[in-house]
Amino acid sequence: MSEVPHELVRVDELGVRGFLHTPQQPSGNGLVLTHGAGANCQTPLLVALARELCSNGITVLRYDLPFRVARPHGPPMRGSDKRDREGIKVALQFLRSRVRGRLFAGGHSYGGRQTTMLLAEQPGLADGLLLLSYPLHPPKKSDQPRTAHFRELRRPALFVHGTRDGFGTIGEMTEALKLIPARTQLLPVEGAGHELLSKRNEPDLPKKIVDAFAGFTA
């Protein structure tokens, strides 16, 4: 795949920052894409997906959440989730001003969970969701599901999940998605763990995800 132009942008005073990928032949649609609790927007999965999405005409803002801007390493600070959701909203508003078509929100693990929580409260912010390795429950703690807001989630959502993800089995994900009143689809990634991308599937997985997303949102 040829390199897609992207530029470093600072979105606002909340400290949201990221990379804006602008396609040569834009479709008019856009997607904001963020990271998990232990990473940043430079994680290989997000970089590969942003490039593939942009090659398919989608303008992508690949961005760091406020907790990651506040400190370069470590998990989110206690109580930072509300500020992180505000950061997601700001990222969506930033990209909304730059695209004329549909706007989607996406994220890996913690970033995806916070995105779903924001959209459950404010569905008008985006037209659909791309959720990578949704952390359904803490590892080995299936009695602590993170689905309380699923019944309020009213935007179509594509979930991408590894068959070896310790944060939820494919069976558990299938059952959880029944709680969501909007249209959903689950894309299993055979042999993948929570990070999804590996040396084994790196050549094919980004395109597989983007093709599935394109079909889901057609």
Image: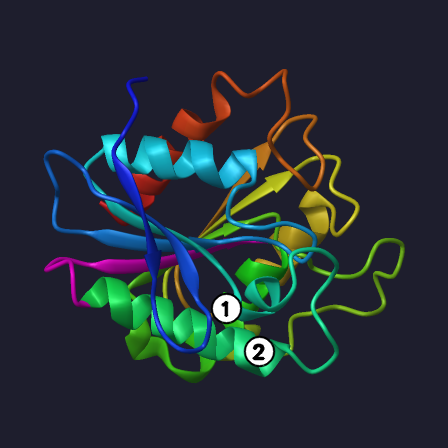
Secondary element under disc 1, as helix, strand or loop, is: helix
Query: How far from the left and from the top, in percent, is residue 172?
Result: 71, 53
Lower sequence index among marks 2 and 1: 1
Query: What numbered label is drawn on residue 149?
Result: 2
Q: Quadrant of the C terminus?
A: top left
* Along the viewing direction, whichever of 80 and 212 lies nearer the viewer: 80
Residue 106 magenta: yes
Point 65% across, 71% down: residue: 147
Is 156 on the left-hand or right-hand side of 28?
A: right
* Residue span colored magenta: 97-108
Q: Nearer the viewer, mark 2 or mark 1?
A: 1
* Along the viewing direction, whichever of 26 and 179 lies nearer the viewer: 26
Query: How far from the left and from the top, in percent, is residue 182?
Result: 40, 66
Secondary element under disc 2, as helix, strand or loop, is: loop
Q: Classify residue 49 by image quadrant.
A: top left
Is 21 on the left-hand or right-hand side of 75?
A: left
- Distance CA(mark 2)–CA(mark 1): 8 Å
* Along the viewing direction, whichever of 91 and 215 lies nearer the viewer: 91
